[in-house]
Structures are given as structure tokens and as C-alpha cells.
């Protein structure tokens, strides 16, 4: 199913429809402030496992991120971090950044692994953030791209994304054309933050 949702003023009825899909264990594709991404409810184990299958990876090897509404949920999944990291995240978010943080004991249960880190995103996108707000907890998410390419080719047209995935997952949200460059990844697991992938987010923020 392809569901058109206006990015500036998301229709509540359509958001509610998407939430019902997520709560039933569905997998969606939705817009962010970078590339289109695949997501499910982190509280639905079967959905998380199915998303790993769709991506063709083992769940314990998956580098999925948590999509949050703001910084308030982050302490539920991460080890306490320094004030310098908090201030950096406060400056950068919402925005096109993924922060790698040390995970607390709740994260290995999500991924059936000994996962010690987790990626955190707060996209600057109304649809993404309202979905998380209405769901009541973060989404588990991964970007949509062609895994066969050495250079990642991101699909920017939601109608083409729908054509590719309509028989594989439950819902594609058309929130307008996506971008073809991913988030900037900042590793905050050490003493000082370190850029490990330069994307849309300005690296001078550190």
C-alpha cells in the first residue's frame, strides 16, 4: 500500500493508519531528512526479525538505528554519557546525524546479540517524528538502498520504492522525493566524538 502524507502538515488519520500497521507487526518505508528508510516497532520482536530477513542479514549482525522523537528516550537504551556529548547532540538534533552510543542491557535483548553500541537518530522530518510520538516508543530503522551496489544507490522516488517493495512489506509512505545522501555518523563511544561517515550533516558541528 502506498500512502501519500504531506510532509509539512501530516494528516492525523493517515498517521493513525500507519501506527496501526506498526502495532500489528508491520514493516513500513517512510521519509526522513536524508534517505527513505525501512522501520518497525522496536517492541515487536517478529517484526524486527522480519526486517532483518528482508535486508538479507542476521539480526545479531544488523546495524539498525533507533529513531527517536527527541533526546528523552535515549537513556532507556544507552549507557550514561558525558555532558559534552549531550550538548553536541542537543546542537545537532533534530538533524541528519546518527550518533553511535554505548548500549545498555536492553539493547542486546532487542537484537538477540551481545551488541554493545546503538545508533540514535532524531530526523528533522515531521512524518518520522510524529510517527514515533504517536507510537509512544522509538522505531527500529535502516536505510533503503540497493545492497548489490558497491556504491550505495539510494532510491529517492517513493513510487519506485513502492514498486520494488509492495509485495515484501506492508506500507510505503510517500512524503515527497527523498535525498540520495545518508546521515553523518558520529561515534561517541570513546572519550571524544569521531566522524566515521560524512553524510548530509555538517561535520564542523563537532
Image (spheres, rainbow, N blue to C red):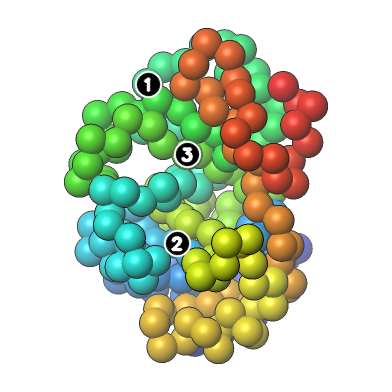
Q: Where is residue 164 in the image (x, y as percent from the top left)?
A: 52, 84
| Disc ID at residue 39 | 2
Q: Assign a secondary structure to mark 2.
A: strand
> Of discs 3 and 2, which sits in the foreground?
3
Residue 185 x/y as whole percent:
60, 38
Crowdedness near tag 2: few (<14), some (14–19) or many (≥20) residues, C-alpha within 10 Å = many
Tell me where residue 35 appears, x and y as whole percent.
Answer: 65, 60
Residues tagged 1 and 2 counted as in contact (Cβ below 8 A):
no
- Which residue was labeled with disc 3? 119
Q: Name the residue under label 1.
A: 79
Q: CA–CA distance between discs 3 and 2?
A: 14 Å
Gap between marks 1 and 3 measured at Cα? 13 Å
The residue drawn where x is 38% and y is 32% is: 117
Q: Is disc 3 surrounded by few (<14), some (14 to 19) or many (20+) residues within 10 Å?
A: many
- Residue at 53% x, 77% y is 172
Whether 160 is drawn above or below 181: the answer is: below
Does 84 sit above or below residue 189?
above
Marks 3/2 in contact by CB < 8 Å: the verdict is no
Sequence-first disc among 3 and 2 = 2
Instruction: Pick the residue in front: 53 or 42.
Output: 53
Q: Which residue is drawn at 41% across and 36% down?
A: 118
Amino acid at each position: 500500500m502506498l500512502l501519500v502524507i504531506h510532509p509539512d502538515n501530516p494528516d492525523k488519520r493517515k498517521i493513525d493508519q500507519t501506527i496501526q500497521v506498526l502495532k500489528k507487526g508491520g514493516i513500513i518505508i517512510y521519509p526522513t531528512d536524508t534517505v527513505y528508510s525501512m522501520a518497525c516497532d522496536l517492541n515487536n520482536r517478529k517484526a524486527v526479525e522480519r526486517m532483518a530477513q528482508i535486508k538479507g542479514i542476521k539480526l545479531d549482525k544488523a546495524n539498525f538505528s533507533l529513531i527517536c522523537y527527541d533526546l528523552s528516550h535515549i537513556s532507556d537504551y544507552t549507557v550514561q554519557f558525558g555532558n559534552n556529548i549531550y550538548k553536541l547532540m542537543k546542537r545537532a538534533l533534530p538533524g541528519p546525524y546518527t550518533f553511535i552510543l554505548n548500549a545498555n542491557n536492553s539493547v542486546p535483548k532487542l537484537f538477540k546479540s551481545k551488541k554493545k553500541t546503538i545508533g540514535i537518530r532524531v530526523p528533522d522530518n515531521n512524518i518520522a517524528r510524529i510517527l514515533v510520538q504517536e507510537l509512544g516508543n522509538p522505531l527500529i530503522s535502516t536505510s533503503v538502498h540497493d545492497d548489490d551496489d558497491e556504491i550505495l544507490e539510494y532510491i529517492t522516488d517513493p513510487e519506485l520504492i513502492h514498486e520494488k517493495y509492495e509485495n515484501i512489506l506492508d506500507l510505503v509512505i510517500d512524503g515527497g522525493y527523498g535525498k540520495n545522501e545518508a546521515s553523518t555518523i558520529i561515534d561517541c563511544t570513546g572519550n571524544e566524538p569521531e566522524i566515521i561517515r560524512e553524510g548530509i550533516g555538517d561535520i564542523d558541528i563537532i
